[in-house]
Image (tube, rainbow, N blue to C red):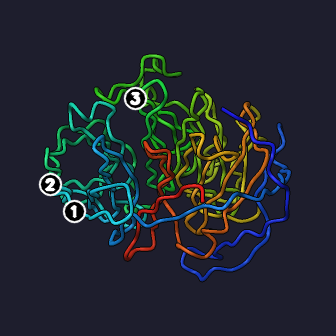
Amino acid sequence: MRTRTSFLVVGAALAVLTACTDAPAERAGTGQVPRSGTSAPTTPSAAETPRLKVETVAGGLAHGWDVGFLPDGKVLVSQRPARIALLSSNKPGATVTTVKADLTDVHVQGEGGLMGLVVHPDFAQTRRFTTCQTHTENGEPNDIRLVTWRLAEDGRIATREKELLTGLPLAQSGRHSGCRPTLARDGSLLVGTGDTAHGTFPQDRTNLGGKVLRLDLDTGEPKPDNPFVDAANRNERYVYTYGHRNIQGVAPRPDSDQVFTAEHGPSKNDEVNLIQAGRNYGWDPSQGGTVGGYDESVEMTDLQRFPDAVPAKWQTGDMTEAVCAATFLAGDQWGALEGTLVITALKGAKVILLSLTEQGDVETVSVPKEFTDTFGRLRAARTGPDGALYLTTSNGTDDKLLRVTPA
C-alpha cells in the first residue's frame, strides 16, 4: 500500500449540519488528532483532492444502511425500515427489486431496524448473506441479532437460515444500535456495536454493547484466539475491543492486519480508531459506576480514568459530523488516493478522506467538493469488486446508491 505525500496543503472549509435535520451551514475545521498520552488534540493539515465522478446507480431506496456485492454483478442493499433491495447491476440505470423476506420481527424505531449486511465469501455456492437487525419478542423490543439468510437463485426471496448471534443489547428507542458487520482479512466477522445509551455497558465486557465483536461467520462461535476467549462469561469471549460509544464503520486496511473503526461522539469528538485486540477505548458514561444514567459530558477516550486506553487516531474536535461507515480506496485507478480511508457523515452530509501512514497515523484530511451540500446524509461506504466506491444516502425518501470513481 502506498503512503500519499503529494497532496497540496490548503485551507479547506468543511460544510456541516448544525443538527441532524437542520439546513447545511458553513463551519471551518478538518478535525483533530489526539496527541499520545493526552486528550488534547492537534490539527492535521487539509488536503486538496482530485476531482471525482459521482453517478447514481439507483434511487427509490429508504435509508439504505449497507451494501453487499454479488458475484454476478448484482447488489444487495439493506434498508433501515426492514426492507432488502436487489439491484440488477452496480452501474447507473440499475433496476430495484424488493426481496421478499420475513422481517416482521424487526423493531424499526429511531436508529434501529435492518442495519448492516455482509455477503458470505462462498455466496456463489451457498447463496448466504448475514444481516444485523433489531428484534422484537412478543411485540416488544428484545435484542439485536445477526441473522444469516439464503437468497433464492432468482433473487426474489430470502429465507432465514439461522440466527448467527443473539443478545446484543437494544434500546426501545433504537438509540445507539450500531451495527456494522465486516469481514476481516483472516475471514473472521468483525461487528461494531453501540452502547444503546446505557452508561455501564461500554466497560462491561460481559455485555455485547459498545464493543467490536469477533466471531466465526459460519458457526457464530467466538474465534478461538480472541483476547478473552477463556472467560467464564460467554459474551466476554466474543469481545475483541471495548469502551466504545456507537461504532458505525469497520474498515480492514487492504494488504494489512490493521482495522479502523468510525464512532459517533456525543456533542464533539467523533472518532476514528485503530483497533487493537483486547484494548479499552475509554468511553465510560457511568464514570466507573459512580453516576447513574448516561453522562455524556465525559471524554470519548477518558485517559484520566483509563491511562492505558487507546487514543483515537482522529477526532472531529469541538463538533460532530456523525461519522458513519468506513472503507478504503483500493486499486491503481485511484492514483494518489489509493489506500485512503473514506468516512461518510450523516449530520455533516459529506465524505471525509483520511490519508494514513503505514503505522495508521493521519497525515492529511480532505473533503471532496462533489459531496458538499449535494446528496445530504451519507451512510454506507463499501469498495466494490470493480474498485469503485459505493455510498448510500440516508435522507428518508428517494435515497440512492451512488458510484464514485476518479474523474
Q: Which residue is mark 3?
A: 215
1 or 3: mark nearer the eye? 1
Q: Which residue is mark 1?
A: 97
How would you rate the neighbour count of disc 1 (Cα within 10 Å): few for under 14, some for 14-19, many for 20 or more?
Answer: some
Q: Rounded to the nearest whole Å, what is the CA distance between mark 1 and mark 3? A: 31 Å
Q: Rounded to the nearest whole Å, what is the CA distance between mark 1 and mark 2? A: 8 Å
The answer to which of 192 and 122 lies nearer the viewer is 122
Horizontal side, residue 168 vs residue 284: left or right:
left
Mark with earlier residue (1, 3) = 1
Horizontal side, residue 227 vs residue 265: left or right:
left
Q: Secondary structure at mark 3?
A: strand
Q: Residue at x 46, y 20 (%)?
A: 229
The answer to which of 288 and 372 lies nearer the viewer is 372
Looking at the rendering, which quadrant does residue 115 occupy? bottom left
Q: Which residue is mark 2?
A: 156
Horizontal side, residue 280 vs residue 11: left or right:
left
Q: Residue at x 60, y 40 (%)?
A: 332
Quadrant of the snapshot with the N terminus: top right
What's under tag 3, amino acid-wise? Leu
Residue 114 in the image: state x and y as whole percent. 33, 56
